[in-house]
Amino acid sequence: MQLKRGLPRESCDFCHRRKVKCDRSLRARQGLASCSQCSLRQGPCILNDPTERRTRRHARQATHGGSAGVALGDGGSRMVRVDLTQGDNPATSPFASASQLEPLLPLEEDPSTLIQYPDDMFGENFLGLSRDNIFFLDQVFMGDGAGSFEWLGQAQDAHHDTQACTSADDQIRNDELPRQIHTEPLQQFPWLDSVVDSNNAFTTALHCYFKFAAPWLPILLEDAFWQDYHNGRCSPILASAIACRGMPFTTVPDKWDLQQRFAHDFREAFLGAQSTASNDGTIRLDNVEALALMVNFEYEDSNSPPLHSNLGRLFLRHESLVMMMLQFRIQERVSTGTDSSVALARARERRVLLYWHVYGLDAFNCLDRKQISLIPDKDASDKDTLPQTEARDFLDAVFELAVIARTILQQLGNNSARRRGIESNDVHDIYARIYQWRNHTCPRHLRRYEESPGTVTTHDNNGHSTGIQQHINLHRAVLWALEINCLMQVECFVSEFGIKESGDLRAEMTRSRVEYECLRALNDMLAICRWIDLNTICDEQGKQHSLVDLAPLALRNVCAGLCYWACQRGIKAIQFSSTKAPDTKEPPINSQNRPAHAYIENAQLLRNEAAKATSHRDTADILERLDKQIAALKAEFDNDPVPGD
């Protein structure tokens, strides 16, 4: 609740941001310097932190207004300490080898302009995610930018030994831990006793996840997982989720039944862990990673307890994942069974990767459902302008496209657009952002070029390739599909809410451009499908996997959505041609050059491309719905009389 004017705030910055009750003043009378919330998280309890923008703004206003300002240090600026660790001992931090001096920030400046990024933060890059975007994501989910400064300062030397993810003290404890998860998987999943070659089934599923499912959507780091896995500190919840997601790519008999068993094990363990967790607003990092993996999974609840089914539908949803990221403190250290604890491998890098995943997933999920995001829009104010610099790699490119997706929802799906129609300028602004992303923001090695009409090429155009080039082709296809999804979503908003009439031709021009951009996106996706057929990924046994099979949420679903749209568009074209006036001056057409015939061919091509996601059980249901739409288009085509016949 708001304080009355003139009353000073007594709650600390942490409790104030999260709107929880703060007992700072009460504990101060008892001689304690920290409130209960900050004491639990083992972090600093700060009141009116001078690094916050709100505090700096008030300080500037007070200074410019002539009131007495705070005393400043040498050089006219106050220097403050910033801490991201939230309780981690610097001596046992994964970045303990770096400088132990915490960065200092002037009071008067904006932090985003003051970060002195080390040139070799993670060697060449951190999976292609720029430091500006790391800082932005930290602001979104932490509420301020304090956390990133120490990390960026301490990470300067961390890349020299990426495998040494724990300090010497932690490593001594890790060597004493039992390696129970790796050596005894049957103790974690007793029902595997009835499975033939059970050890191989479990470990094969884990390896298949990182080999086939993880490259296009890197929710967690492979080397960090295996390090925790072998040292016995990996959460069984995360192991169940990874095995579930990797099982479709195995050749194990009854793999669908095993996938459901692992999924039910995850759900039961996750709900049990949340019910028994202490009420301190914390959650383990690897448990959140597991939830991120299992958000979109379809459970078969015929033989499961109703309690688990109902709780799963309530708490294992996308909205729950976002709320946990916003409200819970992610715990990077796990207990060893004694009073000591150890840090998870590469915990801070995994947390940033989780921020990237949740932000992007939420942006596209809300755009598809046309619902308001739980992530506050005010945190994205710095990203409102068009990006002027080229993204570093795949993660940067996806992030910038996610910002555009959020902008589409904010500009075209707001209350004013729903009531009065969409402003023409907003539509053209969205197209300008998408074109800016395609031609300038997207990294050069991930862009697509049109060598000839209907043919997509890249700057290297290697065709069949091996190694890292295969993953680059997968990243290209995913980015192109996400861009086309954004273009089609613009048409969806315009079809639902319409264009606001302005009394001139601008509304009509905008409708014509929306139609043109959709048809161009459809034609581009057809060319991308042909390009995908030439670029497959081969495993060690020589088996080829389509890129659609490895990235179903992006490639398969976009192909399916465009197939449905092409069918609806073809039906409307047939109905329009059949209602033309008989005295039309247009030349007679035959069945081979009618537009509807082209829509049938295009829809069939998109349907066949979506069918290549053979490793996923729900592909059959998608194909069944697409076949019905194509059959309806063909029936309309056969029943339509052809002029001139």
Image (spheres, rainbow, N blue to C red):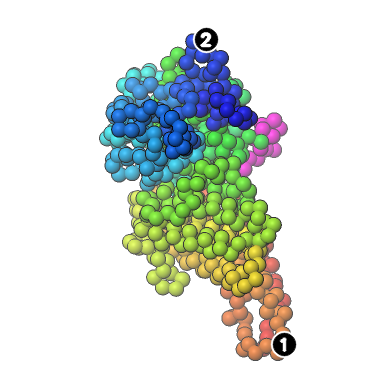
Q: Examine the rendered structure and indicate whether residue 88 appears above or below residue 625.
A: above
Give x and y (percent) for residue 165.
35, 29
Q: Mark 1 points at which residue?
A: 582
Element carrying mark 1? loop
Residue at image position (30%, 33%) is: 75
Q: Examine the rendered structure and indicate whether residue 547 appears above or below residue 504.
A: above
Residue at image position (32%, 40%) is: 117
Q: In this view, does 465 lie to the left or right of 45?
A: left
Q: In which quarter of the image is residue 21?
A: top right
Label 1 with label 2: CB-CB less than 8 Å: no
In this rendered view, identify the residue nearer to me: 74 or 397: 74
Residue at image position (59%, 48%) is: 366
Give x and y (percent) for residue 558.
55, 57
What's drawn in magenta, residue-wise? 298-313
Residue type at mark 2: give it: Gln
Q: Mark 2 points at which residue?
A: 30
In this rendered view, identify the residue nearer to me: 79 or 484: 79
